[in-house]
Image (cartoon, rainbow, N blue to C red):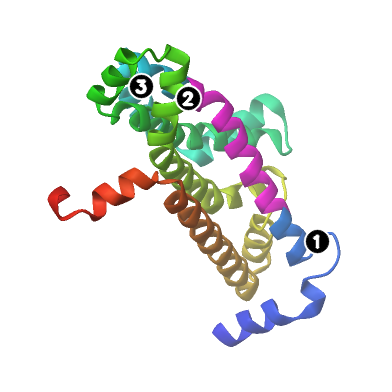
Amino acid sequence: MIAETLAWLTDPGHWEGTGGIARRSLEHLQYTGTVILIALIIAVPFGWWIGHTRRFSGIVVGVSAAARALPTLGLITLFAVLMGIGVVPPLAALVILAIPSVLAGAFSGFDTVDPRVVDAARAQGFTTAQIVTRIEIPLGLPLLLGGIRTATLQVMSTATLAAYVGAGGLGRFVFLGLNTQQYAMMLGASVMVIVLTLLIDLALAGVQRAAVPHGQRLAAASPDSA
């Protein structure tokens, strides 16, 4: 099976054309990028507002727990019934899957900022906008990126279900292989999903590490912080 999977992956003919591995991989990445962008637009302002005001923080916990309990395949099927076959139903379901992690990251980033730092800035005359943009966003950025990283991994691995309702992506090979009993195709597509997910995670880990403010790195490296 491993040899057959490698043969399927390394066959140049399988990478060409609109139905080839390259095109399906690009679709998979496009779905993931679109879903994460929509989740950012929805969840980040809401998470930042809750983290800054310290109000309704229980909503974050409740929404995250409730959204994570929803079955993604069930949501895709429900949206497909309501909206029809295509790419919109799986994207809507994946956005719901991604929002909890992004929301938790945005909220936690602000919530973990030391209130004494905020009070000191306010005492020096900082406005609310300056506190948010110069203190809370930079200090909370690593945790936000951690939430984005988690959401991206979840969406990348779940986007294969998009093909269940007629969309593209690497899931096409999984369902086609299942229907035609071409298990090398199924395993090869799964390997491609794993490889792409690991590469994306590696890139986001680098971005998250680079986003840590210099002062926080020094504090973490200081023996007094242990």
Q: Are marks 2 and 1 in contact (CB under 8 Å)?
A: no
Pick whichever, 162 or 146, lies toward us: 146
Mark 2, residues whose alpha carbon is within 10 Å: few (<14), some, or many (≥20)? few
Outermost residue, front side: 124
Residue identified by numbered label 3: 51
At label 1, the amino acid type is: Gly
Pick whichever, 7 or 64, lies toward us: 64
How many numbered markers are drawn?
3
Quarter of image, res 170: bottom right
Distance (Cα) linking label 2 and label 3: 13 Å
Magenta region, main secondary structure: helix
Where is residue 149? Give x, y as percent: 47, 47
Outermost residue, bottom side: 3
At 37% from the left and 27% from the top, the residue drawn is 107
Q: Is 142 left, or right, of 203 in this rendering? A: left
Residue identified by numbered label 1: 19
Is residue 200 rendered magenta in the image? no
